[in-house]
Image (cartoon, grey):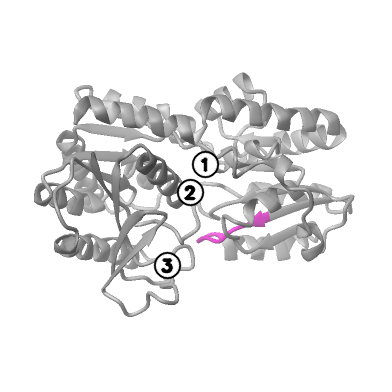
């Protein structure tokens, strides 16, 4: 079986889609699937082309046996919708042009969305490579962009919705990262075949028993007695992270309670200004770290805060950061209702739920988990057991391979 994965995001970039696709690809390759990746020059999240890739139109490399083809992409630190579209469409065009460098036909072409517009290139390449189209939806774009107010142009939204319709109908299988995504697509497109392809975690890589010591606290000027809450990930609009800062102001005279926001994104500068405005010495912003460093970070903290804004759209969302935290036995304060709450709070008993965007409820859960440290430890242990049973990357890849065998 030969599979071509087309994605704008891939390692060495750090991020959820990058890790998820790489981990799936290497496991499918172990199942004797010949996997090729077509991606952009690495630039995310700094929005700056990495050293070694600058001023290049095309690069070929191999990563753990994967054939990786990279084409050029326009990047800009500007947050304007125009520059964002230039970013998306530059890779749409360049990825379509490099198909001659990718030899032979493929059984399947899998396109990662968002960005949805990459679907134009995917449909073209699927024809050129005689491949059946698989469309992987990790975010219901353009619906999420419209409801978050990121895109308001009616012409652009109509174009995007029409493309979404066309892509689903062209695909032999539409895979969704959550059950909620699959249910949404099935409701709107009842004839489309969907498959739940969840995110997961490598339990061997994220293993708290393998890390005997870490100096992360010392390097970042934390005390051994500090109780540290961590948010690690994109600092964007959807997360509503001002909630954490507003909750933290109620604890700023508690010297042993710290709130760490690790990552980058469009809302970071605004949140840093809010920190200064509220004089929050208990809030610390840190730059994102590599995947190699992340287990040591998670071994060093006490709990994770994982919020999303209170939108019906997010009732089917499962933030990827949940999995690594639980694998490392870190209890979570989860501000995501719906599917995530049902899985990780009700079924898995891996943490405490707080109502999205409810500052009072978050404060109450912070107090509950800091005042019951033995309970926090047990919630963390429950988390590792739960993700091992239901979100182990090995099992996810095996099940997906068996599904592809049915439609090859």
- Residue 16 image label: 2
Q: Secondary structure at mark 1?
A: loop
Look at the numbered discs 3 and 2 and tell me whether their residues touch, using CB distance below 8 Å. no
Tell me the residue that label 3 is attached to. 43
Range of residues picked out in magenta: 261-267
Q: Secondary structure at mark 3?
A: loop
Considering only order in the chain, which callout, 2 or 1, is on the residue closer to the N terminus? 2
Residue drawn 58% across the image and 62% down it: 268
Whether residue 241 is in magenta: the answer is no
Q: Decide whether the magenta segment is chiefly helix, strand or loop.
A: loop
x, y percentage for residue 84? 34, 63
Considering only order in the chain, which callout, 1 or 3, is on the residue closer to the N terminus? 3
Q: Nearer the viewer, residue 391 or 244?
A: 391
Separation of disc 3 and disc 2 at Cα?
Answer: 15 Å
Q: In screen coordinates, is 71 left or right of 312?
A: left
Look at the numbered discs 1 and 2 and tell me whether their residues touch, using CB distance below 8 Å. yes
Q: Secondary structure at mark 2?
A: helix
Q: Quadrant location of residue 23?
A: top left
Q: From the image, which quarter does the N terminus lie in?
A: top left
């Amino acid at each position: 079986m030969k599979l071509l994965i087309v994605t704008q995001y891939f390692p060495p970039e750090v991020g959820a889609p990058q890790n998820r696709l790489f981990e799936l690809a290497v496991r499918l390759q172990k199942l004797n699937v010949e996997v090729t990746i077509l991606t952009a020059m690495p630039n995310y999240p700094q929005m700056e082309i990495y050293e070694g890739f600058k001023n290049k139109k095309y690069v070929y490399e191999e990563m753990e046996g994967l054939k990786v083809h990279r084409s050029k992409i326009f990047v800009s630190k500007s947050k304007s919708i125009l520059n964002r579209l230039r970013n998306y469409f530059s890779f749409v065009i360049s990825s379509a042009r490099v198909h001659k460098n990718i030899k032979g036909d493929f059984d399947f072409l899998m396109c990662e969305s968002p960005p949805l517009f990459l679907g134009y290139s995917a449909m073209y390449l699927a024809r050129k490579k005689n491949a059946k189209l698989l469309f992987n939806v990790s975010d219901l774009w353009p619906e999420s962009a419209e409801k978050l107010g990121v895109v308001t142009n009616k012409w652009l939204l109509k174009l995007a919705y029409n493309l979404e319709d066309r892509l689903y109908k062209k695909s032999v299988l539409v895979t969704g990262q959550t059950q909620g995504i699959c249910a949404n697509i099935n409701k709107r497109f009842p004839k489309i075949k969907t498959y739940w392809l969840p995110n997961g975690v490598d339990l061997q890589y994220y293993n708290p028993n393998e890390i005997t010591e870490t100096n992360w606290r010392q390097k970042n000027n934390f005390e051994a007695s500090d109780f540290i809450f961590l948010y690690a990930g994109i600092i964007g609009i959807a997360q509503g992270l001002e909630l954490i800062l507003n909750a933290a102001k109620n604890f700023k005279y508690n010297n042993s309670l710290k709130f760490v926001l690790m990552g980058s994104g469009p809302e970071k500068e605004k949140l840093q200004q809010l920190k200064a405005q509220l004089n929050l010495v208990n809030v610390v912003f840190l730059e994102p770290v590599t995947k190699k460093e992340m287990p040591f970070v998670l071994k060093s903290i006490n709990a994770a805060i994982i919020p999303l804004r209170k939108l019906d759209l997010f009732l089917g969302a499962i933030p990827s950061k949940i999995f690594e935290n639980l694998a490392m036995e870190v209890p979570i304060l989860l501000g995501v209702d719906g599917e995530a709450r049902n899985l990780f709070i009700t079924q898995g008993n891996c943490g405490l739920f707080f109502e999205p965007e409810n500052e009072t409820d978050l404060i109450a859960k912070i107090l509950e988990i800091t005042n019951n440290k033995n309970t926090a430890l047990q919630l963390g242990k429950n988390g590792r057991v739960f993700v091992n049973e239901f979100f182990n990357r090995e099992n996810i890849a095996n099940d997906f391979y068996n599904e592809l065998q049915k439609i090859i």
